[in-house]
Image (cartoon, rainbow, N blue to C red):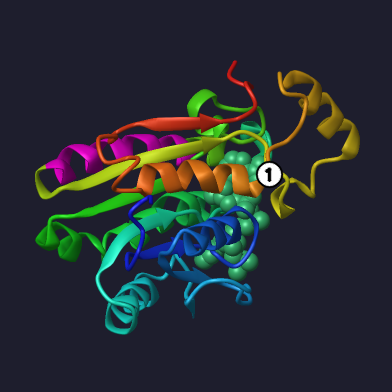
Amino acid sequence: MLGFDDKVVFVSGGNRGIGAAIVERLEDLGAQVAYNYRSSPGEAGSLPIQANVTNRDEMEAAIERVEDELGPIFGVVCNAGITRDALASKMDYADWDRVVDINLTGAWNTVRPALPNMYERNEGALVFISSIVGERGNIGQANYAAAKGGLLSLSKTLALEGARYGVRSNVVAPGFVETDMLKPIPDKVKDKIRAQIPLRRFGKPDEIAWAVTFLLSPEAGGFTTGETVAVNGGHHT
Ligand code: NDP
C-alpha cells in the first residue's frame, strides 16, 4: 500500500532504539531492509552489516554490499547518533569532535556513497533523524545541537540538488523518545521534561518510525521534499 514492496532501504544504527523500530516497521510494510551497527546486530532486517559511520571505507563497502546482495537502494535513513553533554564553557574538544563526527559527518558518510546510483536511477528518498534540539538548541548540548541543526540544512540542500533526479530528502525531528539515549538523564530531570511536554509523556520508537515511513514512501510522501516533520508530543517551544 505504501509502495515499499521490493524496495531496498538502508538504515544507519538499525540494531537498537529508534533505528531498530524503523527497520522493523519498514520490513513489516514490505521493504527489504539493510542496516549497519557498531556493537552487535539487532533482530530484524535482511542484512545487518558491522560498519562505523565515521569510517568512510566501511560505509562505502556497506552500501556496495547492500546493492550487490539485496539490489538497488531506494531509501537511506541516517539514524545513528550519540550524545556527550556538557555546558559549552566546559565541553571537551574531543566530545565536540565525536558528536559532530557521528551525528553529522556520519550521516554524510552514509548518504554520499548511495547518491550517485540513486541519481542515475532517478528515484529514491533520504530521511535524516535530527532532533528537537537541532531546531531550537538546548543547554548542555552545543555539540549535539550543532550537529542535528546541520542535518536540517544538509537535507534541504539534498532536496534541492536531488529534485531533478527524483530523489527526495526530508528530516524527522523527534522530541524525547524512550530509548537507551535517555538512560543517563536522572529520573527527577525526566519528570520535569515530561511536565513540559503537552502530551505528558515521552515518545515510543515506533512513533518515530511511522513518520519515517511516511516520508520514505513513494505513495504517501512522493510530493514531500525539503521538509522537517516534528514528532515531539507538542514540545515545540
Ligand atoms: P540509541 O542510543 O538507542 O541508539 C543509537 C544507535 O546509533 C545505535 O544503533 C548505535 O549502534 C548507533 N551508532 C552510534 N554511533 C555509531 C557509529 N559510530 N557507527 C554506527 N552506528 C552508531 O539512540 P536512539 O535510538 O534514541 O537514537 C537514534 C537517533 O535518534 C539518534 O540520531 C538520536 O540523536 C536521535 N534522537 C533521539 C532522541 C531520543 O530521545 N531518544 C530524540 C531526538 C533524536 P551501536 O548499538 O552499535 O552503538
Q: Is residue 77 visible?
A: yes
Circle 1 is placed at which residue position? 204
User: x, y percentage for residue 168?
Assistant: 25, 44
Q: Main secondary structure of the magenta part?
A: helix
Which residue sits at x=23%, y=39%? 159
Q: In terms of depth relative to the viewer, which is nearer, 69 or 50?
A: 69
Magenta stretch: give its range: 147-163
Residue 117 sits inside the magenta stretch: no
Is 129 placed above or below 175 here? below
| For residue 105, side relative to residue 231 (left or right) | left
User: x, y percentage for residue 137?
Assistant: 55, 26
Which residue sits at x=37%, y=76%? 62
Is 28 placed above or below 172 here? below
Mark 1 is on which residue type?
Lys
For ligand 1, the image quadrant comes to bottom right
Label 1 residue SS: loop
